[in-house]
Image: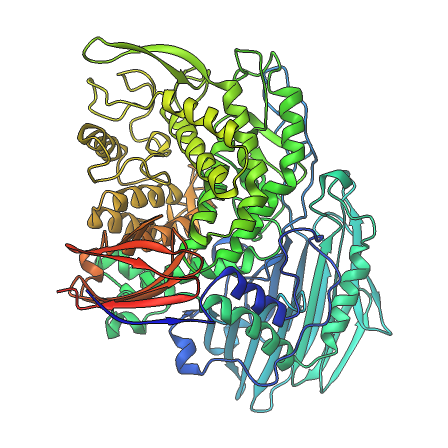
């Protein structure tokens, strides 16, 4: 490999780079400290158009030939979001419907009592649920779908824009919908060519029995209310046109004979990420603030609002670009849903569709995780007030999987929402742990009687609340995700911030581990430390000691704590104690009965063979203790492979994504790829697979399919992991490149653990060029094929390598 050049880059993708972009757009980008819905300074408006040309935009556009059914919005509505507000749009010509959600619109509360069976209450009134904020309807009765021609709706991933167009009576009508982060509003802009006009009404309705009022002088409609938990919320809408007549009629806004129409809607709550203040900001008046935001935004033209939005959105999206090959002309002629169906029916690779699925996941993350609460099971996209599992933060895979993609896919700043959430909840989690974890009703209590640090339940909410059972391993898994973000960014200040979380989890496990004696195959006995009575999610006995899931998590946690103490130069004495505990941890063995890596400290399989969870394979992914090299004993690697094989190739979307990531770590490209393809299977009748709008659907039986967003993030993570594997000090290129993508391709902006970003190109399955840029890292080794090269860079520098033959 030859070094072609080394140079300093001022525009390398980094946390500081994202912050600069955010500051330029006039938005609040600091980690935490602000309410979710708050007044902000007027954004800096672009002085020229940031819009892509039609040809450039086409690369990252999805399109459909029919609008979404208002009765099936979760599978057919197109998502927009500004990181706080999320909406699904139907794009029906005669009745545009938006179902709007605010990420903080949660019922319930702290929920810090245990029931007699040891569970936390887990309902919509006690634990709480994410719910809809409002429904916005723009009725245009004369534009009946049956009367229009050449209908087309488009989701522009690169510019954060939903569009629809159609012909009617000699005119071409167009609409654009976007959720602006700088203006903190959702905008709908209706235009036309050929002399057409719009006549109809704009209606804003709450979904919890709220009363909408309107102001004819300032031409807005709004509502405000509060939940039983004291959370205040509100929303407002306004509309204007340069032609025709717009007026308030009752509680709706009417428009007649308008050649153009701009509708602006916003809303939010008085939630604040501050446990000491009861997670409320009493100074906020959400309805009034919503009115202020929509009226301020409506003071600018639709094009100005669009340019401001795109100038904010595009630089974030463009941090990563990917090309997996060229699809056929016939495939390109199909709309997105037809392509999904054809990919499954014909079993022919469609590399551009597969790359678009990755970019769709990135679009969702940009739209749903910027400067607000993290995304739970559905992100901020609902079609009603009863999302399954309350749309909560599940801690045994789901919220973690949501954020695997962020650093890998050039969206490190989107991870902030997850980190901020954990930090904001820490005091509540610590308090409830100290008071309730060793309760006599908790089946997972510490038999030692000691309790320290913090723990969480399987479900958590934004109020420090817990739902379902205690989940001892969750704190270690949350910390694994938090620490991995440091590995990608090498941001020491960030590590300082999360250190209390990591240390608190370590303290919890120091108090929890118990001593037992194990005897190896040769008859030698030794004392080891194991997890107390626990449950391997979500199967098998609920009173097993030393489950593989927990042992791997704690081994990983203690190792990360060791790194943190050395990087930060603190708690070195306690760090040495923890190092000693780590050396005594029991680590799983291979069952002589099944040949699998044991899930329990038993040679027998105590659960379901093809279970959806891969809990005992944490050490393979997202952990990194088990890998196909000389660092892992051959029997452990074989046992992990055998267990993964036994789990099967067909499960829920999120589980397929996890399986794909594990096969990628084992360098089996075709199995990893097949699981990606399995997730692209079109959902029919509620079956597992992809909905028409590309949301992942889970089959809950009886023909009922539900949306769960983690597969939309986990599958892109798997695609990236097939192209670049990394750990601090080690970067492997194309470790699991499938034949379908081998002919030629490229990817740029991939995050690398150790503090780098990689751009690479390949042809005929071999890397032809790679550029490695430092975003904080200094030393690593690049591996591709049989070659390797040690790299030393200063932050901000890059190096390009080629000639790998």
Farthest bottom residue in view: 194
Would residue 72 be visible to someone looking at this image?
no
Q: Is residue 211 left or right of residue 675?
A: right
Q: Is residue 89 left or right of residue 531?
A: right
Total marks shown come to 0
Would residue 94 be visible to someone looking at this image?
yes
Task: Classify residue 125 by image quadrant.
Answer: top right
What colour scheme was applied to this rendering of the protein? rainbow
Report the front residue among 622 and 226.
622
Q: Quadrant of the N terminus?
A: bottom left
Residue 539 x/y as whole percent: 40, 24
Q: Quadrant of the C terminus?
A: bottom left
Q: Is residue 338 above or below residue 495?
A: below
Q: Is residue 541 above or below residue 785?
A: above
x 60%, y 66%: residue: 22
Farthest right residue in view: 217
Task: Classify residue 344 by image quadrant.
Answer: bottom left
Q: Is residue 628 left or right of residue 480?
A: left
Residue 126 x/y as whole percent: 68, 31
Residue 52 x/y as whole percent: 47, 80
Farthest left residue in view: 805
Report the front residue among 725 and 106.
725
Residue 792 x/y as whole percent: 33, 59
x 50%, y 24%: residue: 509
Q: Is residue 502 above or below residue 186?
A: above
């Amino acid at each position: 490999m030859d070094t072609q050049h080394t140079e300093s880059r001022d525009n390398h993708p980094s946390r500081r780079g994202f912050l600069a972009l955010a500051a330029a757009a006039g938005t609040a980008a600091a980690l935490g400290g602000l309410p979710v819905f708050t007044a902000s300074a007027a954004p800096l408006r672009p002085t020229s158009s940031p819009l892509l040309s039609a040809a450039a935009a086409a690369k990252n556009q999805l399109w459909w030939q029919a609008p979404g059914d208002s009765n099936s919005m979760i599978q057919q509505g197109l998502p927009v979001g500004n990181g706080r507000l999320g909406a699904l749009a139907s794009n029906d010509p005669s009745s545009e419907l938006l179902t709007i959600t605010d990420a903080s619109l949660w019922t319930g509360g702290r929920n810090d009592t245990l029931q007699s069976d040891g569970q936390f209450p887990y309902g919509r009134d006690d634990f709480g649920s994410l719910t809809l904020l409002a429904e916005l309807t723009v009725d245009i009765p004369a534009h009946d779908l049956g009367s229009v021609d050449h209908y087309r709706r488009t989701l522009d991933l690169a510019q954060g824009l939903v569009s629809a167009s159609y012909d009617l009576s000699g005119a071409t009508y167009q609409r654009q919908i976007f959720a602006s982060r700088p203006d903190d509003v959702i905008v709908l802009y209706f235009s036309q060519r050929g002399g057409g006009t719009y006549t109809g009404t704009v209606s804003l309705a709450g979904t919890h029995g709220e009363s909408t009022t309107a102001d004819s002088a300032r031409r807005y409609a709004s509502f405000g209310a509060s939940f039983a938990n004291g959370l205040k919320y509100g929303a407002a809408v306004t509309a204007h046109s340069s032609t025709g007549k717009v007026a308030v009629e009752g509680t709706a806004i009417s428009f007649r004979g308008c050649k153009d129409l701009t509708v602006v809607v916003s809303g939010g709550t008085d939630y604040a990420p501050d446990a000491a203040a009861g997670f409320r900001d009493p100074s906020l008046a959400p309805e009034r603030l919503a009115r202020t935001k929509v009226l301020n935004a409506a003071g600018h033209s639709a094009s100005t609002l669009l340019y401001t939005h795109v100038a904010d959105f595009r630089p974030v999206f463009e941090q990563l670009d990917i090309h997996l090959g060229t699809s056929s002309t016939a495939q390109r002629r199909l709309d997105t849903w037809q392509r999904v169906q054809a990919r499954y029916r014909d079993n022919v690779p469609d590399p551009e569709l597969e790359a678009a699925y990755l970019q769709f996941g990135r679009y969702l993350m940009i739209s749903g995780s910027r400067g607000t609460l993290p995304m739970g099971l559905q992100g901020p996209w609902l079609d009603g007030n009863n999302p399954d599992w309350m749309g909560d933060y599940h801690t045994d895979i789901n919220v973690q999987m949501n954020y695997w993609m962020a650093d890998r896919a050039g969206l490190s700043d989107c991870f902030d929402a997850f980190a901020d959430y954990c930090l904001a909840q820490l005091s509540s989690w610590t308090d409830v742990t100290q008071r309730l974890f060793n309760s006599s009703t908790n089946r997972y209590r510490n038999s030692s009687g000691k309790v320290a640090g913090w723990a969480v339940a399987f479900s958590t909410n934004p109020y420090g609340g817990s739902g379902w059972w205690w989940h001892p391993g969750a704190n270690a898994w949350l910390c694994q995700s938090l620490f991995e973000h440091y590995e990608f960014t090498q941001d020491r200040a960030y590590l300082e911030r999360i250190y209390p979380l990591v240390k608190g989890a370590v303290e919890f496990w120091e108090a929890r581990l118990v001593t037992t004696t194990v005897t190896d195959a040769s008859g030698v006995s030794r004392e080891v430390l194991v997890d107390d009575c626990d449950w391997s999610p979500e199967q098998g006995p609920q009173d097993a000691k030393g489950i593989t899931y927990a042992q791997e998590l704690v081994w990983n946690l203690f190792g990360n704590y060791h790194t943190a103490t050395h990087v930060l130069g603190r708690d070195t004495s306690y760090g040495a104690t923890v190092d000693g505990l780590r050396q005594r941890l029991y680590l799983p063995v291979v069952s002589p009965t099944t040949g699998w890596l044991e899930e329990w400290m038993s040679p027998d399989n105590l659960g379901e063979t093809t279970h959806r969870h891969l809990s005992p394979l944490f050490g393979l992914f997202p952990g990194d203790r088990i890998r196909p090299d000389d660092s892992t004993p051959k029997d452990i690697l074989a046992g992990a492979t055998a267990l993964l094989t036994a789990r099967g190739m067909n499960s829920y979307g999120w589980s397929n994504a996890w399986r794909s990531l594990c096969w990628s770590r084992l360098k089996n490209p075709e199995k990893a790829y097949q699981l990606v393809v399995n997730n692209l299977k079109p959902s029919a009748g509620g079956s597992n697979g992809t909905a028409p709008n590309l949301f992942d659907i889970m089959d809950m039986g009886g023909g009922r399919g539900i949306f769960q967003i983690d597969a939309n993030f986990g599958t892109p993570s798997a695609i990236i992991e097939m192209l670049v594997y990394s750990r601090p000090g080690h970067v492997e290129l194309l470790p699991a490149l499938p034949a379908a993508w081998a002919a030629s391709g490229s990817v740029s902006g991939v995050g690398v653990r150790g503090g780098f970003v990689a751009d690479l190109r390949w042809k005929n399955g071999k890397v032809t060029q790679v550029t490695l840029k430092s975003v904080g890292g200094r030393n690593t080794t690049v591996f591709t094929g049989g070659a390797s090269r040690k790299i030393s860079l200063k932050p901000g520098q890059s190096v390009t390598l080629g000639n790998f033959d």
